[in-house]
Image: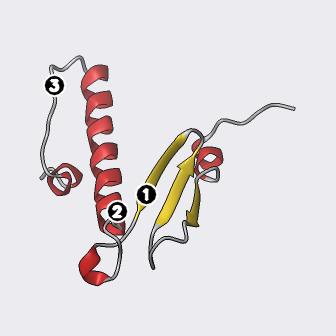
Amino acid sequence: MIESNTAADTIKDVVVHETGRGRFQQEVVWGAHHLIADEPTDVGGLGSGFGPYELLLASLGACTAMTLRLYADQKQLALEGRTGPAASLANPC
């Protein structure tokens, strides 16, 4: 049997489960990687991890930055590291 290594196969390996700590805290696991997602204390969370909005911004920012890096490398363009708020990385215009 040929082992598949597509993005869809990797996505299904991400597991999210409640930790039992606080009302909202979740552990996100993908292979050896773990992170905690939670809500801020002012909305009833423990404030112990990234909130859903921050996770979304982080994923969009990382995807955009990686895409820019790939494009620059393919076109042999000099691209210095760009750092900024993820909201601006996700929408560079």
Q: Do callouts 1 and 2 mark residues in contact (Cβ within 8 Å)?
A: yes
In this rendering, the answer to whether 43 lies above or below 64 is: below
In what quadrant of the picture does the N terminus appear? top right
- Amino acid type at circle 3 is Leu
Mark 1 element type: strand
- Amino acid type at circle 1 is Ile
Residue on which the image places disc 2: 48
- Amino acid type at circle 2 is Ser
Residue nearest the viewer, comparing 59 with 1? 59
Residue on which the image places disc 3: 79
Spot occupied by residue 61 in the image (x, y as percentages of width and height): 27, 49
Residue on which the image places disc 1: 36
Residue at x-position 33% and y-position 66%: 51
Q: CA distance from mark 1 to mark 3?
A: 32 Å
What is the crowding at mark 1: few (fewer than 14 residues within 10 Å), some, or many (at least 20)? some
Residue at x-position 58% and y-position 51%: 11
- Closer mark to the observer between disc 3 and disc 2: 2
Give the quarter of the image for residue 23: bottom left
Spot occupied by residue 7 in the image (x, y as percentages of width and height): 57, 44
Residue at x-position 14% and y-position 53%: 88
Residue nearest the viewer, comparing 8 with 17? 17
Q: Is residue 28 left or right of residue 90?
A: right
Q: Point out the residue furthest to the front here.
A: 21
Q: Is residue 90 left or right of residue 52?
A: left
Residue nearest the viewer, comparing 44 with 61? 44
